[in-house]
Image (spheres, helix red, strand yellow):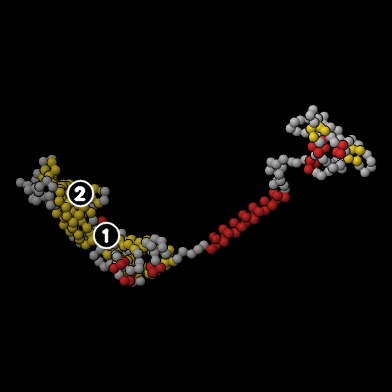
Amino acid sequence: MAALAAAQVTSEDQEVPEHKPVELRCAAFRSSSGSARIEWKFQRGSSLTLIYYGGSSQPYRDRVQFSPTSIRFGSVTREDSGKYICEVVADGSHIAKSEVNLIVQVPPGKPLAHVPSSATVGARAVLRCSEAQGSPPPTFRWYKDGTELPQDPKSSPAFRNSSYSLDPRTGELVFEPVGGWDTGDYHCEASNNVGSPQKSDVFRMEAVRSEVNVGGIVAAVVLLLLFLALAAFGVWFAHRRGYFSSERLGGKKTDPALVSPQCHLGVPLVSPRSLWGQRGHGGGWHIPKSRFSRSAGGKKVIYSQPSRRSESEFKQTSSFLV
């Protein structure tokens, strides 16, 4: 009679160097049984593939030996890394399942370092290190001028003035902010305890101070002066054309005859009140004789009394009589 494990899921990790043999056991099945059914599945990422159910499937048929309690690889490759799931089913019901996470050990290749050639002092700079073939995934170290950068810069006198953060898992080295002392030659190293660590090429990063854009300032000043010159010319031209005269600005034109010291006939003008004197009791004007004047030729100049009178306004309507 078959001996089945309790209805539960067990999981374990198993590491093996690349091109070496390995055997993965089904912990859910204790002994052989003619009534139990065994299935092996392979999961990598989101993909799940059935590799054994009463017989092996491609591409495992020629390189994997299946038994009721295990599967055996004669030589594993990095593509074999993943999760192997053993399901034991009896009498049409799920009984137990076990998982083996197979890690095929592959030494890391040469990492790629991404280092900016220059970084502005006071700004943020990110240095990245990446490696794709190592299994398990490698961790990263950074070096400046041949000296390893500690994760905490304050722990080392050589990097006490620097301000950075270092993530060994992602390989990111972030300077925030960049200082003048961060200038140097940088390279990274990848290792996963399989084979020897691998180093990247060396790249130099210069910490530079931001410079004032003299050319931009000069161009802005020239444009400003040109604008002011054009505005001044526009004002001068408008003034010459009379656009700023009282008539164009909405003012009233004054009759020159009312402000001129002489009339059109060459006779001085006098005010109506001084000409006619005082208003009489009947509403008329009393003209004193002293108001008459005589010209150089002996001819009298007589002023006639206005034909229309108004309490608020006096209008001279008669002309001069000689």
Q: What element carries label 1?
A: loop
Asked which quadrant contains residue 13, the reply is bottom left
Q: Can you tell which of label 1 and label 2 is closer to the viewer?
A: 1
- Judging by the rendered image, the residue that carries numbered circle 1 is 137
Residue most toward the front? 281
* Image label count: 2
Picture quadrant of residue 77:
bottom left
Along the horizontal axis of the image, is 261 left or right of 232? right
- Residue type at mark 2 is Lys
Residue 252 locus on image (x, y percent): 72, 40
Q: Residue at x 33, y 69 (%)?
A: 160
Residue 102's label in the rendered image is none
- Looking at the rendered structure, the kind of residue marked 1 is Pro
Disc 2 target residue: 41
Spot occupied by residue 283 in the image (x, y as percentages of width and height)? 79, 29
The answer, for residue 168, to whether it is visible in the render is yes
Q: What element carries label 2?
A: strand
Q: For this view, does 145 lie left or right of residue 33? A: right
Question: As drawn, which residue projects farthest toward the right?
Answer: 297
Q: Local crowd at mark 1 within 10 Å, few (<14), some, or many (≥20)?
A: some
Image coords of residue 236 (percent x, y): 69, 52
Mark nearer the N terminus (1 vs 2)? 2
**Cα distance, mark 1 to mark 2?**
24 Å
Residue located 84% across and 32% down the image: 305
**190, 271: nearer the viewer:** 271
Instruction: Pinpoint residue 184: horizontal percent, then vertical percent.
Output: 38, 69
Residue 20's quadrant in the figure? bottom left
User: Is the residue 125 above or below the residue 41 in the image?
Assistant: below
